[in-house]
């Protein structure tokens, strides 16, 4: 890896193009280094995982509405949209929009933690859509996905957005854009201009994940995919982007990430060095924010030692700052304790997740969020006894470890009126690579099959799994099959409507 210093320069001292960080990103994307078998295998896992969670969300309102918008943009030889027949094709920009929204809706796919958090599977939908429209091969797609993951995660390792109240999707702008550049085999100069455009318009606030969390959380990564497609298209036509986008006097660093005195160091693979960052990511077994994953598993374990949850007086979760501030009581969001809160809010409430998991011993992407479930009186009583505490030791362990080894869990103390406190802790979710039951290919396939139950026919499930596992050998005419159809008549918004502008 090569370490790159990024800082703001006066306009009179603007670095040369080749010295700018956007150029370094572009050069990495243009480097045609082969993708290893292990990385290719993980790319396949992530495509399966994305399709699984998209099918589970296929008829939820935000997903149906995104699909309805895509239906207004048909294109012969374009890209496929989840749920619709593969013969129907749409503009890649809009197919990627619909599919990325479906993937993100349930907050149920892969995760990464560095200086910034990320859901890098958000890169994939736009890349598949462009690959389908532009007749690329399976090997091209694998290289593009590996590139996008590398860039997003290298940025997330060193460039924190959270501390500046910028939403973490901002790093998707350059990563998806560079991934498309790699997919299409574009030169460094073209990708450079597209990256600058994408970075410039990719910044938004963390209000996306605060208070009463709205459906925009599902759309936000899809929006970045649209930005990336547009940025590449403009650059391919010879247009440029704001420059230098990282180092300029009024750049994103100067304006949003600490000002003129802030210096970042970001490590990127050198020329000819493989892009392996995807191997530091991990997926979710439960449909809750990743900070909640270990606590759901710990609740399952602790409930075996509790006869009556009504006897609980307090539940205190000691964990790292992000857990406390993003999903815990440290957020100071009263909505995280509200039985009538949106699903998007509840899946970011560790207090709710722990209470329901402790009572039920299961977590289901639909049943665990139903109004009847969240409004159950005994659950509300237990839920409001749960609080989180930022713990210096968990902060230290999280901050000092390498990405894959960062402990995501915490320590739980449960007090009772009539017995000694119950204390237990967990470092990693069970499905984490370092957890009790690390996910492997059969687990991804099982997750896909489970989430497709009642939605997708058995033959279609088998077809998709067989096709995607042959991805390295797929020719361009086979990539259209990277879609999952649902039976006719079972899909909301399966035909174009006229409720909006499109």
Image (spheres, rainbow, N blue to C red):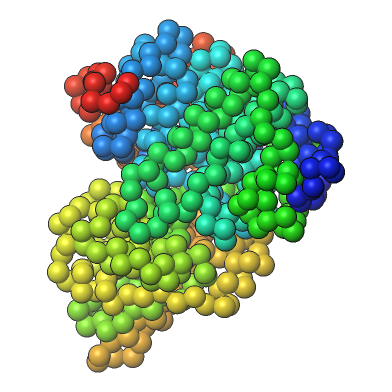
Is 123 displayed left or right of 89 in the figure?
right
Residue at 61% in and 20% down: 234
- Which of 389 and 165 lies nearest the eye of the viewer? 165
**Where in the figure is residue 402, as x and y percent of width and height?**
66, 59
Residue at 21% in and 68% down: 379
Residue at 50% in and 65% down: 322
- Which of 95 and 7 lies nearest the eye of the viewer? 7
Residue, far top: 76
- Which of 317 and 253 lies nearest the eye of the viewer? 253
Residue at 75% in and 25% down: 189
Is 24 displayed left or right of 201 in the figure?
right
**Where in the figure is residue 491, as x and y percent of width and height?**
23, 26
Q: Does the image show residue 362?
A: yes
**Where in the figure is residue 426, as x and y percent of width and height?**
48, 69
Number of marks: 0
Residue, far front: 12
């Amino acid at each position: 890896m090569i370490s790159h210093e990024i800082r703001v320069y006066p306009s009179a001292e603007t670095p040369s193009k080749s010295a700018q960080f956007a150029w370094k990103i572009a050069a990495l994307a243009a480097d045609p280094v082969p993708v290893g078998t292990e990385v290719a295998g993980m790319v396949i896992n992530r495509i399966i995982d994305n399709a699984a969670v998209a099918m589970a969300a296929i008829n939820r309102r935000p997903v149906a509405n995104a699909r309805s918008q895509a239906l207004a943009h048909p294109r012969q030889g374009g890209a496929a949209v989840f749920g619709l027949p593969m013969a129907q094709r749409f503009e890649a920009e809009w197919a990627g929009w619909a599919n990325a929204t479906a993937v993100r809706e349930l907050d149920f796919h892969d995760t990464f933690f560095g200086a910034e958090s990320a859901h890098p599977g958000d890169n994939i939908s736009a890349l598949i859509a462009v690959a389908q429209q532009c007749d690329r091969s399976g090997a091209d797609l694998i290289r593009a996905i590996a590139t996008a993951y590398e860039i997003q995660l290298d940025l997330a390792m060193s460039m924190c957005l959270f501390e500046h109240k910028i939403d973490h999707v901002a790093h998707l702008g350059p990563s998806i854009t560079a991934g498309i550049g790699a997919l299409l085999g574009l030169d460094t100069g073209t990708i450079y201009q597209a990256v600058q455009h994408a970075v410039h318009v990719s910044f938004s606030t963390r209000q996306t994940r605060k208070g009463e969390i709205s459906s925009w959380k599902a759309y936000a990564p899809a929006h970045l995919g649209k930005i990336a497609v547009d940025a590449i298209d403009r650059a391919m036509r010879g247009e440029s982007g704001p420059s230098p986008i990282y180092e300029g006097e009024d750049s994103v660093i100067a304006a949003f990430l600490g000002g003129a005195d802030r210096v970042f160091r970001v490590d990127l693979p050198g020329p000819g060095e493989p892009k392996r960052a995807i191997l530091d990511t991990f997926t979710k077994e439960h449909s809750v924010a990743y900070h909640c994953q270990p606590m759901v598993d710990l609740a399952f374990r602790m409930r075996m030692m509790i006869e009556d949850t009504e006897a609980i007086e307090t539940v205190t979760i000691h964990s790292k700052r992000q857990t406390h501030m993003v999903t815990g009581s440290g957020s100071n969001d009263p909505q995280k304790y509200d039985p009538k809160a949106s699903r998007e809010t509840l899946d970011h409430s560790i207090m709710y997740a722990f209470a329901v998991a402790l009572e039920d011993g299961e977590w289901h992407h639909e049943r665990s969020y139903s109004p009847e479930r969240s409004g159950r009186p005994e659950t509300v009583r237990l839920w409001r006894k749960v609080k989180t505490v930022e713990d210096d030791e968990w902060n230290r362990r999280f901050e000092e470890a390498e990405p894959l080894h960062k402990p995501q869990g915490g320590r739980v103390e449960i007090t009772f009126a009539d017995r000694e406190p119950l204390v237990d802790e967990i470092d990693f979710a069970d499905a984490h690579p370092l957890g009790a039951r690390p996910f492997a290919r059969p687990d991804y396939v099982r997750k896909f099959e489970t989430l497709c139950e009642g939605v997708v026919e058995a033959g279609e499930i088998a077809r998709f799994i067989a096709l995607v596992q042959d991805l390295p050998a797929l020719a361009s005419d086979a990539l259209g099959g990277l879609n999952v159809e649902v039976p006719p008549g079972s899909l909301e918004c399966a035909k174009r409507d006229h409720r909006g502008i499109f």
